[in-house]
Every structure is written in C-alpha cells, then in structure tokens.
Amino acid sequence: MAEIKKIKNREIILKIEEEYHVGVARRAAAEHARLMGFEEVRTTLIITAVSELARNILAHAGKGTVTFRGISTGEKRGLEIIFADRGPGLEDTARVFRDGYSTKDSLGIGLSGAKRMMDELEIESEPGKGTTIRVRKWL
Ligand SMILES: Nc1ncnc2c1ncn2[C@@H]1O[C@H](COP(=O)(O)OP(=O)(O)O)[C@@H](O)[C@H]1O
Ligand SMILES: [Mg+2]
C-alpha cells in the first residue's frame, strides 16, 4: 500500500494528508478489526470513529498520522489507534467533547461520537503544538 508511511515494531503508520487518506484509514481499521476477531457491529463502530478522527486531522490540523497497534494486558487483547498531528491544538480538551461544539460550523459530534464508539479515548493537546488522540477497543 503506497499510503503506508512506515511499519515499525509491528505498528502501521498511515499518513493523513489528502481526503482519500481517510478512506485508506477506514479500510485499514476494517482489516485490523476483522483480523483481530472483532465482530461486525463493533468493527463498524471502530471504522466510524477512525473516520471522524482522521477527518478531524484534515479539517482542523491539515495533516497528521494514524497508527494502528495491537495491544494486550495479559488477559485481554485490543486495538489501539493513535491520531497525531502538529496542528493548532485544542485549548479546552473538555469542551470539545460536548455535542454540537465546533469551531468550523460543522456538526460537532465527531469527537463525542468517537468517545462513545470506542472503549477508551485519551486526548493530549497543547495549543500551537498539536494534538494526539489515543483510542482503544478491547475484544
Ligand atoms: N486534531 C484536531 N486539532 C485541533 N482541533 C481539533 C482537532 N480535532 C477536533 N478539534 C476541535 O474540536 C472541535 C470538535 O470536533 P468534532 O466533534 O469532530 O466536531 P467538528 O469536526 O464537526 O467541528 C472541532 O471543531 C475543533 O475545534
Ligand atoms: Mg469532526
């Protein structure tokens, strides 16, 4: 896949720089989830969350990366997906999770939706430096 930026320590890193990269990330999410054994409904939730968060990179930061990695804690296995950009960052990491909050006059339900669709979501952001969003879903 020409869109893969690199494969390091069994992680797959995709770049998000063009609209069609969102589709590439969606397909990568679908493939990872199915290969790991997620059933269809939960796979769809993962794909939808990836779609929203990858689209946010394009819309709000311009470009960035999406990383897929399998994780395990000993007793449980899961899929972790990391969205990273060096865009403008977020000033209020709590406010962005409110339904309807958008600085772009769009729906403002992407982040709140992604949080509900995944089991865990962590956001790290510094104004002027960028944003990293880490989501996990356990099998
Ligand atoms: N990667 C990002 N970098 C900077 N700001 C972001 C990023 N992702 C989301 N945001 C901010 O969070 C707000 C809410 O995001 P979201 O819920 O997806 O709504 P929308 O994309 O429709 O505006 C955005 O309007 C934007 O201000
Ligand atoms: Mg959005």
Image (cartoon, grey):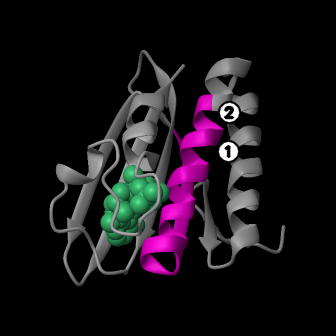
- The kind of residue on which mark 2 rests is Ala
Given contact means CB atoms under 8 Å apart, are the residues at marks 1 and 2 in contact?
yes
Disc number for residue 108: none
- Is residue 131 visible in the rendered structure shown here? yes
Q: Is residue 52 magenta?
A: yes
Q: Residue at x 67, y 19 (%)?
A: 41
Q: Is residue 110 left or right of residue 97?
A: right
Number of residues whose C-alpha sits closer than 10 Å to that of mark 1, classed few (under 14), some (14–19) or many (20 or more): many
Instruction: Find residue 24 and report its horizontal and vertical position in percent.
Output: 75, 60
Please tell me in which quadrant of the rendered image residue 136 appears: top left
Question: Is 70 above or below relative to 124?
Answer: above
Please tell me in which quadrant of the rendered image residue 33 appears: top right
Magenta stretch prevailing secondary structure: helix
Instruction: Find residue 103 and report its horizontal and vertical position in percent.
Output: 33, 68
Q: Residue at x 65, y 40 (%)?
A: 47
Along the line of sight, the residue nearer the viewer: 57 or 75: 57
Location of mark 1 (residue): 29
Mark 1 → mark 2, Cα distance in angstroms: 6 Å
Circle 1 SS class: helix
Number of residues whose C-alpha sits closer than 10 Å to that of mark 2, classed few (under 14), some (14–19) or many (20 or more): many
Along the line of sight, the residue nearer the viewer: 105 or 114: 105
Question: Range of the magenta residues?
Answer: 45-70
Quadrant housing the C terminus: top right
- The kind of residue on which mark 1 rests is Ala
Question: Is 10 above or below relative to 55?
Answer: above
Instruction: Find residue 21 and report its horizontal and vertical position in percent.
Output: 71, 68
Q: Is residue 77 left or right of residue 126?
A: right
Q: Is residue 50 magenta?
A: yes
Q: Residue at x 51, y 29 (%)?
A: 78
Determine the quadrant in which ligand 1 lies. bottom left
Disc number for residue 33: 2
Question: Is 76 above or below relative to 44?
Answer: above
